[in-house]
Image: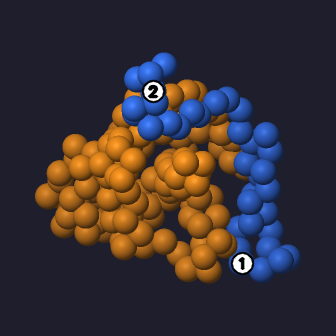
Amino acid sequence: MTVEVPRETGSDAPRATWRLNGTLRITTAENASRG
Amino acid sequence: MTGPHGPLNLTGELSLEVDGVGVQVHADGADVRIVAEDVGDFVARVREAATARSGVAPGRRDLGGLAEALAEAGITAHLASPTRPVAVAGAGVHSPAGGLLLGTRLVRPRAAVVVLAVGGGRRLLVAGASVLALGLVLARRRR
């Protein structure tokens, strides 16, 4: 996934390109222990 | 110390490339490790994003709030370069050095950062931990 992230405030702000690859799973510890 | 929904559990591997700078995120239970090829550059990019969002650059108060949020979620976050640790924040951290240099004992600066903190190294910690804050915010919204 590629996301363009503003570097400054304003609608015409230059943007940084963030590329993400992989998985990050966030659950409550309770749910994790249930499998 | 945990939040209203108890401790969180994080698992997975995430690769990021921020304007060509590689970052690896490894999460296993209550521990999250962020390793950036160039920690300073990565942190600068994250700070830019945070500043663009709020209009105000993150500071000591934000770092303290973030560290508290991590601790409440039972998460310990480790920020490192490929060759050395930079900082540890969140659950189980009680650092007098962090309290002195960064305004929160919930962040333990490692040796390299102690020197940098005097001249603006606080930015490293604020931005590095912001990635984790984003994950925690998303997790809370999904519940």
- Residue at the farthest top position: A35
Give the left or right position of residue A28, taking residue B93 as reference: right
Crowd class of label 1 (few under 14; some 14 to 19; many from 20; radius 10 Å) = some
Q: Please report whichever mark, 1 or 2, sits nearer to the chain's N-terminal start.
A: 1
Q: Mark 2: which amino acid? A: Ala
Where residue B72 appears, as percent x and y from the top left, is: 32, 52
Which residue is pictured at 62% across the width and 58% down the height? B45
Q: Quadrant of residue B48?
A: bottom right
Label 1 lies in what chain? A
Q: Residue at x 36, y 53 (%)?
A: B4
As displayed, is residue A29 above or below residue B112? Answer: above
Towards the viewer: A28 or B37: A28
Question: Mark 1 — residue?
Answer: A9
Instruction: Please give left or right for residue A31 compared with residue B64 in the image.
Output: right
Chain A colour in the picture:
blue
- The correct choice, above or below, for B137 with respect to B110 in the image is below
Give the letter of the orange chain.
Answer: B
Q: Which residue is mark 2?
A: A32
